[in-house]
Amino acid sequence: MTGKLALSVAIITKDEEENIPALLDSVSFADDIVVVDSGSTDRTVEIAENFCCRVFSEEWRGYGPQKNSAVEKCRNEWVLLLDADERLPAETAKAIAEILKQPAADAYSFRRKNYLHGRWMRHSGYWPDRQVRLVRGKFGSFRGTIHEQWATRGAVADLDAHIDHYAFSGYADMLKTLNEYSSVIAEELHSSGRRAGPLSPVSHGVGMFLTIYFLRLGFLDGLDGLATALTKAGGSFFKYAKLREIQARRPE
């Protein structure tokens, strides 16, 4: 690929100095890279500025609102939505360049390869893990503050291409994410009117473990598959357990 592509890349960050260099290298073909940072205390902002990104500092408002803010700041019609722990393979960059010559849809989804301990997780619910990532910025927006999804007014097409995702540095990171996400989701569930019964935490936790480890063939991913099944089950258990805590604190 010669020259820069008329494409914006939207990224949100906080303390991503270990991840962001590889991401920025993988999207260096784009002529506009927007980084919305929410209070990094490491070298994230410095690295992004040195890479000639347009960097904005904003208070954290949740994944969906933060990503919408990044998209709104993009200069091009087409926006590539990526997280700091993701990478864009060269073949996928070429596919994007071809698509933008004559787009046939208003948003495109990619398969996502999730890696743990340097190994591609082929099972455990991690593949094909389709994500809408190439979009006409003015045709949609993100919905939700966590597990946010792009909603478009136009057509969505699925691409035979992938992005690489290095979500967790190890098991401790998985447990940290479990705790953070379950708290946010519990608040969202309560705000939406959902309520949890006495058996909800256990039933959802057990159901998730059986789904990931057996139905999604997590056992074929070895110890990492077992860890994934346990942490996802724990996430399901704790989001409903925390919902019950909220219900107890805020009786109707």
Image (cartoon, grey):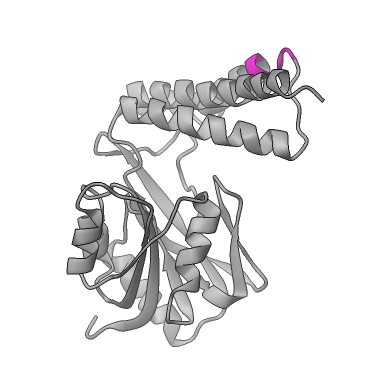
Look at the picture and state if 51 lies above or below 191: below
Residue 208 position in % (x across, y down): 58, 25
Residue 133 visible at all = no
Question: Residue 5 falls in which quadrant of the image?
Answer: bottom left
Judge whether residue 163 is colored magenta. no
Task: Name the image quarter holding the N terminus.
Answer: bottom left
Instruction: Judge by depth and name the residue closer to the eye, 206 or 50.
Output: 50
Q: Residue at image x 29%, y 30%?
A: 170
Residue 85 position in % (x across, y down): 32, 49
Residue 246 position in % (x across, y down): 67, 24
Instruction: Judge by depth and name the residue closer to the eye, 219 or 152.
Output: 152
Question: Residue 225 falls in which quadrant of the image?
Answer: top left
Q: Is residue 11 left or right of residue 247?
A: left
Task: Name the image quarter holding the C terminus.
Answer: top right
> Magenta: predominant secondary structure element?
helix
Question: Residue 191 falls in which quadrant of the image?
Answer: top right
Look at the picture and state if 212 lies above or below 46: above
Q: Is residue 98 left or right of residue 234?
A: left
Look at the picture and state if 51 lies above or below 22: below
Q: Is residue 179 left or right of residue 19?
A: right
Q: Which residues are magenta?
A: 198-202
Look at the picture and state if 93 lies above or below 175: below
Instruction: Judge by depth and name the residue closer to the eye, 107 or 76.
Output: 76
Residue 80 visible at all = yes
Q: Residue at image x 54%, y 45%?
A: 146
| Tally of marks | 0
Q: Residue furthest right?
A: 252
Q: Residue at image x 65%, y 74%?
A: 154
